[in-house]
Amino acid sequence: MDEEGYRKYLTDREHPIPEEEIQKAIPMVRRFEEFAKKRGRSLETAGSKELNAFSKELIEETANTYENLVALSRYGYFVKNLDLYLAILELVDGAEVMNVLHERLGEMVGDVIRDRILPESSLPPLGLPSVEKIDVTKEVMEKMKDSLDDETCMRVLNAVAHGLPKDFRKGERQKYLEAGSIDEYLKRKRESAIAELENYRDSGALFYNARVTDEVVEYVRSRPDVLSGERRGNTIYHTKIPYMAIEFLAASDEKMKRYYACHCAWARESILTGEEVSDRFCHCSGGFTKQPWEAALDCPLEVTVDKSVLRGDTECSFIIHLPDDMV
């Protein structure tokens, strides 16, 4: 382990890491280094296989904290081991979803039904490998199907919205008021989204944990519905940018396209197993997708799933229904 270099990397940042945090991070990195060595790997070559096994060890010891995983992710980024860095992001990406679902169930259908579907004792631990998340999601969706009608199931999942608080998008309201109309707001939103993609491409930084190339930018340019959404009558038709866009564009196999398109760590791996998680779970992503529009228009909106990789489509698309008096 390059402790001196790692320490310098942590302290020379725009927002330096406190010394107390560094003192805790270094032993965790050293421990993972020894773990990886026993499996013929180093900190520079370890990947998801080693990380997932190590994470399960941390879970057994209740040492599976964000702080410990972040310490490893920062070291992976420091030594330019993107396989390790992305493997850690995979573990923490959306990790709060089931906890938030537990909360929303309690708020919206009551503690008794909540505990029938997802009791606190069944909440999955932080750091659970994605392949093991499949069974958790399937079981929860089956119990929701048995306990709730379709409308309630959709509303609860919409309310999860990846766990983001309602005021996370509060800046969208001012942007909409400055634009003066839905069409102008959408135009500016799209221009901003493409400019952001170009910045990620030029800087080499990761967008949704993936690289951006000229091909990715041109793909988004050619699809007005992708990333920012497209006005279609009294709706906004929004298609998610593929999670791994470079691989998605290069793939010819439909199953792999679906896999590369999916953003959800709680469902993605099920595509490869051939026993997909129910596409009802995509209502969670629907809630996330409509959130900025609800903030912009300052009112609740309905959203429906039009396409889903979990039902066999090669992309995920949502229809956000605009109020009649705003179109």
Image (tube, rainbow, N blue to C red):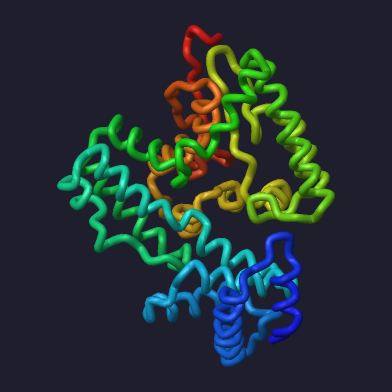
Residue at the spot 58% in from the left edge and 62% down from the top edge = 89
Which residue is the extreme one toward the front? 19
- Residue 105 visible here: yes
Vertical arrangement, residue 103 with respect to residue 270, above or below: above
Q: Is residue 224 left or right of residue 24?
A: right
In this orientation, which residue lies closer to the viewer: 111 or 230? 111
Q: Nearer the viewer, residue 200 or 20?
A: 20
Task: List x then y, in percent, for residue 256.
Answer: 60, 53
In the picture, the quarter occupied by the N terminus is bottom right
**Given the current orientation, which residue lies at the most extreme top position?**
325
Check the image and report above or below for 65 versus 26.
above
Locate residue 151 relative to residue 213 in the image: left or right: left
Above or below, 56 relative to 204:
below
Q: Where does the image place residue 133, in percent across and percent down from the top left?
A: 41, 61
Picture residue at 30% right of the left edge, 50% below the top: 102
The residue that appears at 64% across and 41% down in the rendered structure is 241
- In this rendering, the answer to whether 24 lies above or below 251 is below
Which corner quadrant of the image does residue 2 belong to?
bottom right
What is the number of callouts on the image?
0
- Any part of residue 271 in sight: no
User: Extreme left residue here?
Assistant: 112
Quadrant of the frame with the C terminus: top right
- Where does the image place residue 80, in percent across and percent down from the top left? 74, 71
User: Based on the displayed image, in which of its 4 quarters is residue 84 positioned?
Assistant: bottom right
Percent coordinates x, y for residue 88 in the rendering: 57, 67
